[in-house]
């Protein structure tokens, strides 16, 4: 599928340049760039009908090719050929082998067992919990003070 993406991108660029050139060559209401190439004369290169008919048909087909390649590129982008696991960044990566430390090395063995976390002190079924672990209930004297009422606004003098 990689070759399809390259072909579609090439056709996309060629058709976009062709659409731009063909649109610029067409004669508009004011004699634009098309008049410089003789598109208004009856005896032009494109025949007695003039260049307008040929240029409009060529522009139509170049636009069709442009839109078809745009759709094809969108389809190729959203339907990758391989699975994400096979085509990831780490594809083909091999982990380096662990080297054994020399016998007198000062570096501790990384594979050693991790020390266990000490257990929390357990309370027996009949004994109360330690006093430091349970907070005391606040008394009514520790209540939050109330906010004073706002002062009355001074009367306006007229």
Image (cartoon, rainbow, N blue to C red):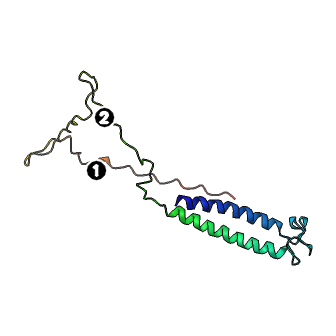
Residue at 41% of width from left, 46% of height from top? Answer: 92
Residue at 68% of width from left, 72% of height from top? Answer: 64
Residue at 70% of width from left, 64% of height from top? Answer: 15
Q: Would you say 104 lies left or right of 90 here? A: left
Q: Position of residue 23 (x, y in %)?
A: 79, 67
Q: What residue is disc 2 on? A: 98
Q: Secondary structure at mark 1?
A: helix
Residue at 88% of width from left, 66% of height from top? Answer: 32
Front-lying residue, 24 or 155: 24
Badge 2: how crowded within 10 Å, few (<14), some, or many (20+)? few
Q: Is residue 122 above or below residue 1?
A: above
Q: Residue furthest top?
A: 104
Q: Position of residue 13 (x, y in %)?
A: 68, 60
Badge 1: how crowded within 10 Å, few (<14), some, or many (20+)? few
Q: Position of residue 28 (x, y in %)?
A: 85, 71
Q: Would you say 124 lies left or right of 105 here? A: left
Front-lying residue, 37 or 110: 37
Q: Is residue 85 above or below residue 124?
A: below
Mark carried by residue 140: 1
Q: Point out the image quarter for the C terminus.
A: bottom right
Quarter of the image holding residue 133?
Answer: top left
Numbered-mark total: 2
Q: Would you say 103 lies left or right of 50 here? A: left
């Amino acid at each position: 599928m990689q070759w399809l993406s390259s072909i579609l991108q090439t056709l996309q660029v060629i058709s976009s340049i062709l659409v731009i050139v063909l649109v610029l060559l067409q004669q508009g209401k004011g004699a634009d760039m098309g008049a410089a190439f003789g598109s208004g004369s009856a005896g032009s290169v494109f025949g007695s009908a003039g260049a307008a008919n040929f240029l409009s048909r060529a522009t139509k087909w170049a636009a069709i090719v442009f839109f078809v390649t745009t759709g094809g590129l969108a389809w190729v982008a959203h339907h990758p050929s391989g699975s994400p696991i096979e085509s990831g960044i780490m594809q083909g990566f091999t982990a380096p082998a662990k080297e054994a430390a020399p016998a007198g090395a000062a570096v501790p063995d990384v594979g050693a067992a991790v020390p266990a976390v000490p257990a929390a002190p357990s309370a027996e079924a009949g004994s109360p919990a330690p006093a430091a672990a349970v907070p005391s209930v606040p008394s009514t004297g520790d209540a939050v003070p109330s906010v004073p009422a706002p002062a009355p606004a001074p009367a306006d003098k007229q």
